[in-house]
Amino acid sequence: MLKNNSHAFCCRLTIQIIGSGLITVAAVYLTQPPAAVAQDDARALDTKAWGEVYASVASRIDIKPIGSDQRAIELQPRAMLSWDNPVRIGRTEGDFFVWLQGNRPAFVGTIFSYDYPASLQVTRRVAMGFHTVNRQPATLHYQDRLLWNAPAIENEPIRLDLAAPRARRVHRLIQMRQIAAGVKASTLLDENPQDLRLLSKPVYRFELPESGAAESDVLDGAIFALVTGTDPELLLIVEALPTSEGEEQFAWFVTPARFTDLPLQVAIEGVGNIEVPKTSGTKSVYFNYHGVHQLPTALGDSVAEILGD
């Protein structure tokens, strides 16, 4: 009874001070339990702060080549895509990064997080997923811990029977978009097919001069993503590569790269259908790891302090 009288007094006081127009708003505010406010704050997801976490984790990953090509494999510091997945539970979201060797992508990876336990939403697990597109093995360390002995990519790029790459860079981008639009794919989640949607803009465009780069033997290239929500499930590496048919002769090639642990069905126009079974693990060209960090959802400290620097 005392509690109800207290609430009534608050409402009457509000009428005298600010008039009747805000009676309901004031009453709700004054009667909201402090514990509920604290709980809501603990569950709030600050995407900008979490983006700093993803960038910091990515910067701590060290990928070293094994083989004849000892050029450094280096992170492109800016995230190529920020994504979220409305299908999977736990408010799953993350950022997509590219590691280059020379001018060509060697590894593509995502640093992401999700509520864990999903029902509470007060802590989040930080995870990573990678696909090698390198033609030689490499090792991946995080904070001096070996996580993955990455094998060389298993399949050679698929040559497409299409018109030769155009002379100008802007025209080659049009060609690459047309190639990506000719690829259809779906995943299988809990026995339910999920069609993937192509992002029309590449998530990464090779940074090459107009005439290509001799040291990488690539005239041009881009990475496209087929997504659930905005979460990449399949990547398409589209490249203009030299052929054996004569000097300075180039053709279009595509390399599908899984970016999910779910099974995939892929149809490439002019090539046919490809079934990609569910797979992951340290011996696969695709690797994910879910034990990076577990952090409070509400990030109150600096990233360096949170990650243990």
Image (spheres, helix red, strand yellow):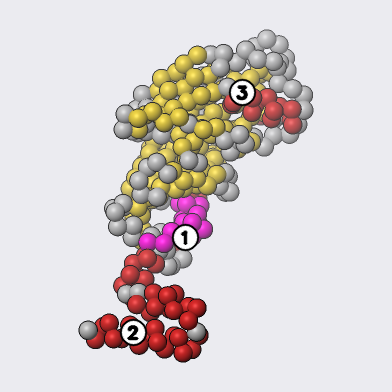
Three-letter amino acid code at the position of disc 3: Ile
The verdict on residue 52 being magenta is yes
State the residue at coordinates (58%, 48%). 78
Q: Which SS type dominates the magenta stretch? A: helix
Q: Secondary structure at mark 2?
A: helix
- Please indicate whether residue 70 sits to the left or right of residue 10 in the image: right
Q: Nearer the viewer, residue 243 or 23?
A: 23
Whole-Å distance between the Cαs marked 2 and 3? 67 Å
**Cβ–Cβ below 8 Å for labels 2 and 1?**
no
- Mark positioned earlier in the residue sequence (2 or 3): 2
| Quarter occupied by the N terminus | bottom left
**Which residue bears the numbered disc 2?**
8
- Please indicate whether residue 221 sits to the left or right of residue 147 in the image: right
Q: Position of residue 177 (x, y in %)?
A: 64, 28
Whole-Å distance between the Cαs marked 2 and 1? 36 Å
Decide: is 193 above or below 115. above
- Mark positioned earlier in the residue sequence (1 or 3): 1
State the residue at coordinates (42%, 40%). 129
Q: Position of residue 154 (x, y in %)?
A: 45, 22
**Which residue bears the numbered disc 1?**
46
Magenta span: 43-57
Circle 1: is it few (<14), some (14-19), or many (20+) Cα within 10 Å? few
Whole-Å distance between the Cαs marked 1 and 3? 37 Å
Res 208 seen here: yes
Q: Secondary structure at mark 3?
A: helix
> Picture quarter containing residue 166?
top right
2 or 1: mark nearer the eye: 2
Q: Position of residue 121 (x, y in %)?
A: 34, 57
